[in-house]
Image (spheres, rainbow, N blue to C red):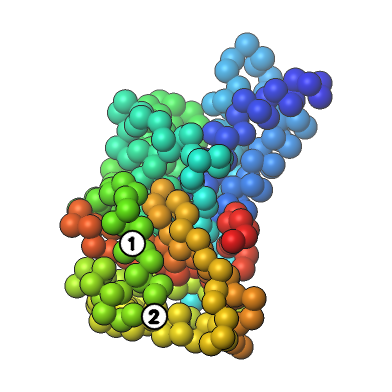
């Protein structure tokens, strides 16, 4: 039994983790969903052993995810909410998945569906709409397969899918997937530099910056809008986060499919996060249109130390 379960875990874990992350926008929650799903499989395996196991595992995990999302919304969140960043460079759990060719009929590639912009857009959907959209438009499930996974009907899935796509229309109008490049990496570094002019030059005129401190550290309570204000905000952060005589350790890594800055201070000023990730979304013109600063300790568990 142990050997069979180990094989089951190895064959399906990565797929289920990717699904769980897109459902929740949280690496820690994705870990929990995978563990809960396999615990259900071990305690109460499906009765039909002649049928493929993955659809059953997906059904269990998606229903667990919907319950988790409902509870999260009831609890609320202090300050702006951002997804928990994950590393997607070579050797990571997600790298091979997001590097593959898009599924034949999928609306969104696995790489795009791991971006902050996409995960933030999903927050406008109900848990049920989110499940339908991820299964239909990311994982390329048919209407019948989606209905089976959600214990619903094809007609209901079709209606929910239409509403979910309507809720994603603003995202769809603005979407632009730009591959990592030396230019994008340079723009990412400019945002974190102590140089307002260099930071502003890397930003689009209507750029928006959101910081998530989870109530732990000082952070903007509302989005910062416009190139001048965003540049000033992040350069001030660079100047005040650590002691003047210390230089932070930092690295540029591929986070959620694009280059991002990971920074750590040995010492930080009071109420300033000693560790943070600055993640960007880049428009088709190569300029940064969204800056996301993730500072919340609980959301940085999937990011390795610098």
Picture residue at 26% right of the left edge, 68% below the top: 202
Q: Nearer the viewer, residue 118 or 40?
A: 118
Q: Residues within 10 Å of mark 1 (few under 14, many from 20)?
A: few
Is residue 249 visible from the viewing direction of this image? yes
Image: 9 above or below 191: above
Q: Position of residue 256 (x, y in %)?
A: 44, 51
Q: Reading the chain from its start, which is encountered first: label 1 or label 2?
A: 1
Label 2 element class: loop
Name the spot of residue 182 as percent of width and height, x first. Answer: 32, 53
Q: Is residue 208 left or right of residue 297?
A: left
Q: Quadrant of the C terminus?
A: bottom right
Q: Position of residue 20 (x, y in %)?
A: 54, 44
Q: How many marks?
A: 2
| Residue hosting label 1 | 186
Q: Residue furthest right?
A: 2
Q: Residue at x 64, y 47 (%)?
A: 31
Residue at point 54%, 77% (across, down): 247
Q: Which mark is residue 194?
A: 2
Figure check: 272 above or below 145: below
Tell me where residue 151 appears, x and y as whole percent. Answer: 51, 34
Q: Residue at x 57, y 81 (%)?
A: 246
């Amino acid at each position: 039994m142990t050997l069979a379960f180990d094989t089951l875990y190895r064959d399906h874990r990565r797929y289920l983790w990717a699904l769980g992350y897109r459902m929740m926008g949280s690496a820690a929650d994705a870990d929990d969903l995978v563990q809960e799903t396999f615990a259900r499989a071990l305690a109460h395996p499906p009765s039909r052993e002649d049928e493929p196991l993955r659809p059953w595992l997906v059904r269990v995990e998606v229903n667990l995810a919907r319950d988790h999302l409902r509870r999260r919304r009831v609890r609320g969140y202090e300050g702006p909410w951002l997804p928990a960043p994950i590393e997607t460079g070579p050797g990571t759990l997600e790298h091979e998945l997001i590097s593959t060719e898009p599924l034949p009929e999928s609306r969104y590639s696995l790489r795009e569906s791991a971006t902050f912009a996409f995960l933030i857009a999903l927050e406008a959907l109900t848990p049920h709409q989110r499940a339908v959209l991820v299964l239909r438009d990311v994982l390329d499930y048919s209407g019948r397969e989606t209905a089976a996974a959600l214990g619903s009907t094809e007609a209901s899935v079709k209606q929910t899918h239409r509403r979910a796509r309507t809720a994603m229309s603003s995202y769809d109008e603005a979407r632009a997937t730009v591959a990592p490049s030396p230019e994008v990496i340079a723009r990412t570094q400019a945002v974190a530099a102590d140089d307002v002019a260099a930071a502003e030059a890397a930003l689009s005129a209507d750029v928006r910056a959101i910081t998530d401190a989870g109530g732990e550290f000082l952070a903007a309570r509302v989005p910062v809008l416009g190139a001048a204000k965003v540049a000033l905000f992040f350069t001030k952060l660079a100047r005040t986060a650590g002691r003047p005589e210390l230089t932070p350790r930092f690295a540029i890594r591929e986070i959620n499919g694009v280059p991002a800055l990971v920074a750590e201070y040995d010492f930080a000023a009071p109420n300033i996060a000693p560790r943070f990730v600055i993640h960007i979304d880049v428009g088709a013109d190569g300029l940064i249109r969204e800056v996301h600063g993730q500072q919340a300790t609980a959301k940085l568990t999937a990011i390795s130390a610098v």
